[in-house]
Image: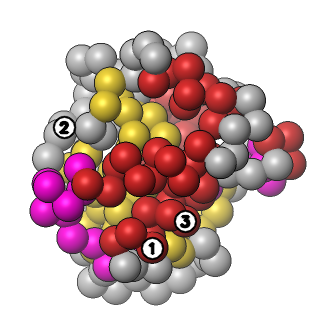
Amino acid sequence: MRWDVDGVVAPFSYEPPLDHYLHALKYGGGRSLGRAFALLLAPALVAARCRVDALVAVPLHGSRLYERGYNQAQEIARTLARALHVPALVQGIERRGAAPAQAGQGALERRVHVARAFRVRRDLAGRCIGIVDDVVTTGATVNALAVELKAAGAASCVAFAVARTPEPAQTRNV
């Protein structure tokens, strides 16, 4: 797989007890956990000296957003943007279609499901973008979004996630 993500910062492992809280954020209506996770993630980004011009939360398709009532990555990005003093970009960045849930999918299926899943309709010329998600498993989702962000002119894209699955086979840490 070609990597368009220039690095991944995910300071925690997706294991108990953290996995329970991330699951609650995503599926259990635990919207307020997004703020707490952002506050946990911010010091790791500062320590890693990650400097970005803006954040982009991995967008959800409208039907998934309607089901959940909120985008868990956007909940993290909103607080994280304030902590890092950068904007969180929303307009002009979207998910094209509803894809099957990534949970339980292998690396190949994840790449296939997210290939061309995103559309960016804004000028990002020369900007360094932090892609925010809750968990990085194979990196397929953040990489697919990075492809489109760079096509819109982004100079670099670094993925920021609260956690990663143990020993992710296809991600690189900064």
Residue type at mark 1? Arg
Q: Residue at x 69, y 38 (%)?
A: 30
Q: Residues within 10 Å of mark 2 (few under 14, many from 20)?
A: some
Image location of residue 103, percent across then percent down = 58, 21
- In this picture, is 25 found above or below 69? above
Q: How many marks?
A: 3
Residue 73 in view: no
According to the picture, the residue beneath numbered tag 1 turns out to be 82
Q: Picture quarter containing residue 99?
A: top right
Q: Which residue is mark 3?
A: 78
User: Is residue 30 or residue 99 the one in the foreground?
Assistant: 30
Callout 2, which amino acid? Arg
> Which circle, 1 or 2, is nearer the viewer?
1
Position in image of residue 54 (x %, y %): 39, 75
Please, what secondary structure does the residue beneath circle 2 have? Answer: loop
Q: Residues within 10 Å of mark 1 (few under 14, many from 20)?
A: few
| First to last magenta residue range | 44-65
Q: Residue at 54% of width from left, 53% of height from top? A: 35
Report the side of 67 relative to 80 (left or right): right
Q: What residue did someone put label 2 on? A: 172
Looking at the image, is 60 positioned above or below residue 162?
below
Name the N-terminal-most of marks 1 and 2. Answer: 1
Residues at marks 3 and 2, CA–CA distance in whole angstroms: 25 Å
- Name the spot of residue 34 as percent of width and height, x first: 57, 48
Q: How many residues crowd mark 3 within 10 Å: few (<14), some (14–19), many (20+)?
A: many
**Amino acid beneath label 3:** Arg
Residue 76 coordinates in the image, percent (x, y): 52, 54
Whether residue 45 appears in this view of the structure is: yes
